[in-house]
Amino acid sequence: MSVFRPQSNTRARLGLAAVVALPVLAIGFVLLYARTVYFTSQSFPAIQPLEFDHRHHVRDDGIDCRYCHQTVETDASAGIPPTELCMGCHNQIWNKSPTLQLVRQSYFDDRPIAWRRVHRLPDFVFFNHAIHVTKGVGCVTCHGRVDQMAAVEQVQPLNMGWCLECHRAPAKNLRPPDQLTSMTWKAEGDRDALARSLARLYDVRTRVSCTTCHR
């Protein structure tokens, strides 16, 4: 008399297959999820404590990025504009608007506005805005068309693969010095020749060693 039923072999095979397949599927799911916008935080506008429309300030009023982000060419951080800078205009313009009540309160209380950060890199990643900007990388390359955003959102994945893609061939992302903050600049003529010329101008080379970003 047989101890096991005929179906036992099939069940044993299915069990072994599941033991092998489940870890593979789990790893595959994690790898796929890491490439979705839900993991990279792309395409999700940041809700700020105060309505600030970049379309109006950048596109309509023509305010240069560096007017508000004053340390982008000198420091690792681009900098957040102090309330005093906002009030430089808004003590004359819309100075009684209810929309700007938080700005006025921040100014008179001498307490900064708690802006919500949009782009965030892991703590183990070293990133310096100044070196990228002074070497010819324009704002649009990483931040997208902020002049078309009512609320700023992250447009690039900012993952290691995306960074390395640029670090392996940086010349194609370089701009002339007077076009770094332009939202609409397009290269004219021979784009490859211009890229090579700008790479020489900025003394830009490929950088793919681990210590470039992990220090």
Image (cartoon, rainbow, N blue to C red):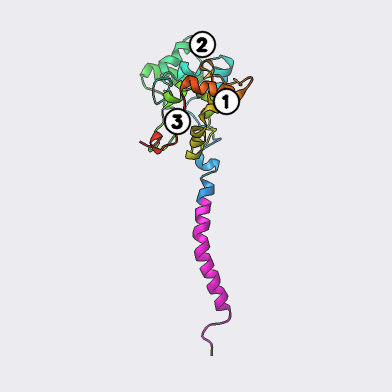
Quarter of image, res 211 = top left
Could you tell me what secondary structure mostly forms the magenta stretch?
helix
Q: Could you give the CA–CA distance between mark 3 and mark 2, rounded to whole angstroms?
A: 26 Å
Q: Could you give the CA–CA distance between mark 3 and mark 1, rounded to whole angstroms?
A: 17 Å
In the displayed structure, would residue 14 be above or below residue 101? below
Residue 117 numbered tag: 3
**Residue designated by label 1:** 145
Q: Closest to the observer: 47 or 155?
A: 155
Under mark 2, the amino acid is Ile
- Horizontally, residue 27 falls left or right of residue 106, namely right
- Horizontally, residue 70 falls left or right of residue 8, namely left
Q: Closest to the observer: 59 or 181?
A: 181
- x then y, percent, for residue 17: 53, 67
Residue 197 lies in the magenta stretch: no
Residue 93 numbered tag: 2
Q: Residue at x 38, y 16 (%)?
A: 108
Please tell me whether mark 3 or mark 2 is closer to you in this view: 3
Mark 2 lies on a secondary structure that is loop
Q: Residue at x 57, y 21 (%)?
A: 194
Mark 1 lies on a secondary structure that is loop
Which stretch appears magenta? 1-29
- x then y, percent, for residue 186: 61, 21
- x then y, percent, for residue 45: 54, 32
Under mark 3, the amino acid is Arg
Q: Earlier in the sequence, mark 1 or mark 2?
A: 2
